[in-house]
Image: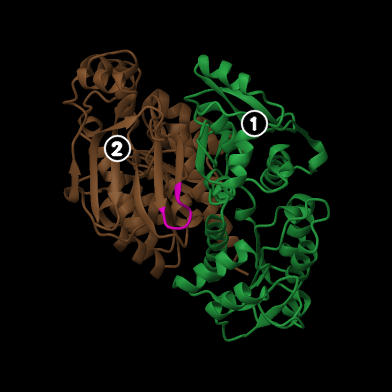
Chain colours: A brown, B green
Amino acid sequence: MKIAILGFGSVGKGLARIINEKNLGIIITAVGDSKSGIIDNKGLDICKILDNKEKTGLCGDMKITPELILNSADYDVLVEVTPTNADTGQPALEYIKYALSKGKSVVTSNKGPIALEYSNLLKIAEENKCFLRFEAAVCGAIPIIHALEHGLAGNNIKRIYGVFNGTCNYILTRMSDEKLTYQQALLEARELGYAEADPTYDIKGIDAAIKLVILANTILGFHKTLDDVDITGIDNIPSDALQLAGEDEKTIRLIGEIDVENEKLRVSPRILLKNHTLVVQDTLNAVTAETDLAGNVTLIGKGAGSVETASSIISDLLFIRECNGRRY
Amino acid sequence: MKIAILGFGSVGKGLARIINEKNLGIIITAVGDSKSGIIDNKGLDICKILDNKEKTGLCGDMKITPELILNSADYDVLVEVTPTNADTGQPALEYIKYALSKGKSVVTSNKGPIALEYSNLLKIAEENKCFLRFEAAVCGAIPIIHALEHGLAGNNIKRIYGVFNGTCNYILTRMSDEKLTYQQALLEARELGYAEADPTYDIKGIDAAIKLVILANTILGFHKTLDDVDITGIDNIPSDALQLAGEDEKTIRLIGEIDVENEKLRVSPRILLKNHTLVVQDTLNAVTAETDLAGNVTLIGKGAGSVETASSIISDLLFIRECNGRRY
């Protein structure tokens, strides 16, 4: 299986390194980002490219654009891991559309295009008999899409709810366990690399909300946008609130919830018993699906990180290969 | 998709009822158990058969044997849900082999054949270009096979461990929370239908051990038997031990573990912190996979029950249909 990788930040680099180290039968024929690109249809020398990128900031030749890669590289699957733009989905959206329209399957970790245009992208994929997969776009390494799409197939899903943002979960865990203020916990999260310099996207609940939109539109067939989500972040929670909850064997977590029957999406801080399944520690994510047959099924794991994201991307690549292999 | 169901106990009846109620595009053309059977290639009247079974103990005609169903009914998939025989796997093993050798896919909840002869059965399935799936054989409604097989594909699995037996988990939960003795908790479990009249299979750890053998042989490619598992049950745990653990914010759970590197399988009571992810309540099951890329991924859900088992069987049926539909 030959793949082209567009986006060569921490996820793209991590993925390339892992595919290079593991013997998975996946050959990387092209790599590109906004500044440069490189193509070798026999398979790239990944160590050299990673080295170049570290030394020069470039992964290849500045004349090799993403468009050139999409057009002229030899690949079965496009791995699209450019930065997320939640408003327009670009440039990822165009890359994905182009690849699918040429009959190339796409695996992406990019929330923007999936949240904004899933039904349209799926239509292009189906028309061109190829796959669009996005396990890495929701909850990092947790195989939530596989579980909902296949593991719980045939169930009516009544509710999906859980901890969808590791940064917020880390901050709330530290406020609760160490009696830190919100500002202290945020500072710590920044120092550890769990929060960005501008943490708005995480702490205001927007990241969790986008993941709800993706699950709603892909698994449940809704047509929601970010504006449809009722969002409250964690930046106004006083540390007193966590201490008070703690005295009662409770704590606070930022919970995202899809109420399927009422088609309502909500992200908000909630008070939960400390021994509740969804009260996970530090940067973990946890998601419960409430179903008619299987009852409640919960998945817990790491929601972020370049290696964890690579895990989900690789699972999607291998799934596409397995499905294509069954063309007998 | 047309299916034949062999085995018409609680799982078979539950499955037939649900398929009849849900509009999944699955037609049941034959049903049989050890006493009787019925075939209608246009689709059976399930309500009538369930009614007959309740009134007479028979699902059909005593002249219609499982062999006759396997030979002469029109089905794409055999759903094999006869009682488990952990020693011989029979008669299920022969039914499964027969169907696979005729190119019919098989979905089973039966631990015996999978634990005893997976590699052989898989070979027959591959030779005949059909599927053998068994999600329901391990941890009821938890989609553990889907998660390990596809969701974590590409990962090296280092360890699989967890709570694989709901009966034991119920007894230990009650001993811990309500300070019951083992005998009192077992009695309660029996009254609630969580434990059989002869609870040996569960409380001695054999059921959990078989599930480990299945995961080891199917997901990890080992060739283990029940004799390879180091097993300690829960019947010798004094209630004092749980009280002592409780004073230290700990508790006891029956944990099954596959140590992949050392190829060791073990079932034994272990002391865990009460807030450990695997300390689930009542009859729940919980399984953690420790991996190189995804880190630890945990799945929690209902490990038994006829509706829950039907959930997993249906997910396998729909997966087979989806894979076959992708023959373009």
Residue A295 falls within the magenta-colored stretch: yes
Occupied quadrant, residue B224: top right
Of B148 and B277, the residue lying toward us: B277
At mark 1, the secondary structure is helix
Occupied quadrant, residue B103: bottom right
Marks 1 and 2 on same chain: no
At mark 2, the secondary structure is strand
**Magenta span: chief secondary structure:** loop
Does residue B129 appear anywhere in the picture?
yes
B324 horizontally vs A110: left or right? right
Of B314 and B132, the residue lying toward us: B314
Within 10 Å of disc 2 (Cα), the crowding (few <14, some 14-19, many 20+) is many
Disc 1 from disc 2: Cα separation: 38 Å
Q: Callout 2, which amino acid?
A: Ile
A104 horizontally vs B105: left or right? left
The circle drawn on residue B53 is: none
Where is A47 relative to A110, above or below?
A: above
Report the residue marked by disc 2: A255
Magenta part of the protein: which range?
A: A291-296
Where is B310 relative to A23, above or below?
A: below
Q: Residue at the spot x=27%, y=17% of the render?
A: A185
Q: Chain of mark 2?
A: A
Pinpoint residue A192: horizontal percent, then vertical percent. 35, 18
Pinpoint residue A282: horizontal percent, then vertical percent. 38, 24
Report the residue marked by disc 1: B182
Residue B245 falls within the magenta-colored stretch: no
Of A321 and A38, the residue lying toward us: A321
